[in-house]
Amino acid sequence: MGTPFDAAGHARSVWNEIVEYIRNMHSPLVRQWFTELEPNELSSGVLTVRCSTSIQQQYLAIRCREVFNDAAQAVTGKLVSVNFICTSGANGNRVPNIYNDVILSPDYVFENFVVGSTNQLAYATCRAVIESPGRNYNPLFIHGSPGLGKTHLLQATCQEMLNRRPETRIVYVSCDNFINHFMTCVQAGGSLDQFRNIYRNAVDVLIIDDIHFLAGRNRTQDEFFHTFNALFQQGKQIILSSDSPPLEIPQIEERLVSRFGNGMVASVGKPCYETRFAIILKKAALRGINLPANVSELIATRFENNIRELEGAITKIQAYAMLNGGKYDLETANLALGDILGPSDRIVTIQQIIEAVTHFYSVKVSDLQGKRRPKSISMPRQICMYLARKRTRHSLQEIGGYFGGRDHTTVMHAIKTIEDYRKNDPSIARVLDQIEASLDNQAARNAVSNTPRNFSQA
């Protein structure tokens, strides 16, 4: 008699293989909260996976379904698809009480938002709005350059409102889609009542991302002006985001600028070093990555403009680590980021070059500076000259002086020789890559140790 088939165990086994496949093939997609997902059953070619929240369900179904289906077919060798469900609450698989074109991300919650000196006011006002929508800070206008966390704050506010008061009716759209929706209704004729019902009547909270796209849209601005007034008079909460403060948005009617500035205007600025460091750790943890401190310091030192740059650096390091046995060390980070570091970040001293080359070839410094010409000595000497020209600001004459007072023509010949070797000899190219990786490590340590840190600003 055969062993009874364990359907639940089979679904779990297939699911684990799918997640592992995605971890290897699409690592930036994987999130720590995937551990909350529960395989339900595998039946008729469909693997049903239960989500903890409707936000997770919607995000996975819209943003990730194709990747999960590909993974399911890869690991089973069959035409298997993945269906995400959520049965918690009365709303089933639908994100409750929200009309939106924005897909809410489970990543964008307050627990994952790092508060620093440049975003503290915006964070605090969002929390205050949640406590008393329509009364505290209405409208709330958040502005800052792209990639600094405005959307994170808006989505976190939206999700927290729904967690606390599931009956809250929220309209959350991008300004671009607000414009498109309005123009479609105008062109259709007679459907403006439907548009106004969505944005003025059937709403408790209106959230519009990138409101600066209203610039120059006179008819849409007029419609939004009346929508704003209708909501404000009803005590409904309005939350807006923009790349610029109200007074600096071009081609916006003065009456709108006045209303934008009538509530709370809060800026989100570039994060300081300590905030960037904390953001890197948080973003890495969301992916299940435990980054060493020196790698986090390297990223925080190199990328200062916005959070998207930090995430891009983590993604690139993650990809290199997957090819390097899962090692998240400084060498892997330097290899991953080497092509996007600025030239000043890669400068080292001639002494450091000499130490790296003599260590690799097991030769003495005195040999490099002497007159001997066997290949075992001349090759390391020429590599030193080549790297000195590439990685320092010294002149040809100064470089020659480090190696027994050789003239600039000798240095030029050495540089040309190694350039030719690098192009035509893969073994020499690998040696040069390895030595330069060690120099990058040294440059990174120098940059991190020289980074000014004022923890009182965090």
Image (cartoon, grey):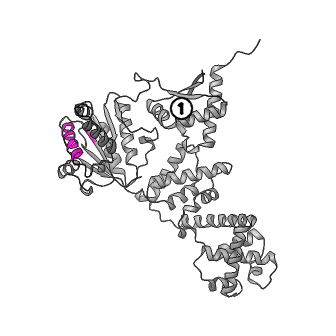
Task: Please give left or right for residue 255 compared with residue 347 in the image.
Answer: left
Q: Amino acid at mark 1?
A: Glu
- Determine the residue positioned at 19% across, 34% down: 234
Residues 272 and 176: in front is: 176
| Quadrant the C terminus occupies | bottom left
Any part of residue 312 in sight? yes
Residues 290 and 241: in front is: 241
Q: Residue furthest top?
A: 1
- Determine the residue positioned at 67% across, 84% down: 400
- Determine the residue positioned at 24% across, 55% down: 251
Task: Please give left or right for residue 186 compared with residue 154 in the image.
Answer: left
Measuring from the top left, give residue 200's x and y in whole percent: 23, 34
Measuring from the top left, give residue 68's x and y in whole percent: 57, 34
Any part of residue 128 in sight? no
State which region is magenta. Answer: 214-238
User: Pointer 1: residues within 10 angstroms few (<14), some, or many (20+)?
Assistant: few
Task: Please give left or right for residue 147 compared with residue 71 in the image.
Answer: left
- Determine the residue positioned at 74% across, 67% down: 425
| Rendered view: 51 above or below 155 | above
Is residue 443 magenta-colored?
no
Q: Which residue does the numbered mark 1 point to in the structure image?
A: 36
Tag 1, which secondary structure?
A: helix
| Rendered view: 261 above or below 426 | above
Measuring from the top left, give residue 209's x and y in whole percent: 34, 45
Is residue 232 magenta-colored?
yes
Task: Please give left or right for residue 439 compared with residue 343 in the image.
Answer: right
Q: Quadrant of residue 23?
A: top right
Measuring from the top left, give residue 417's x and y in whole percent: 71, 76
| Quadrant the N terminus occupies | top right
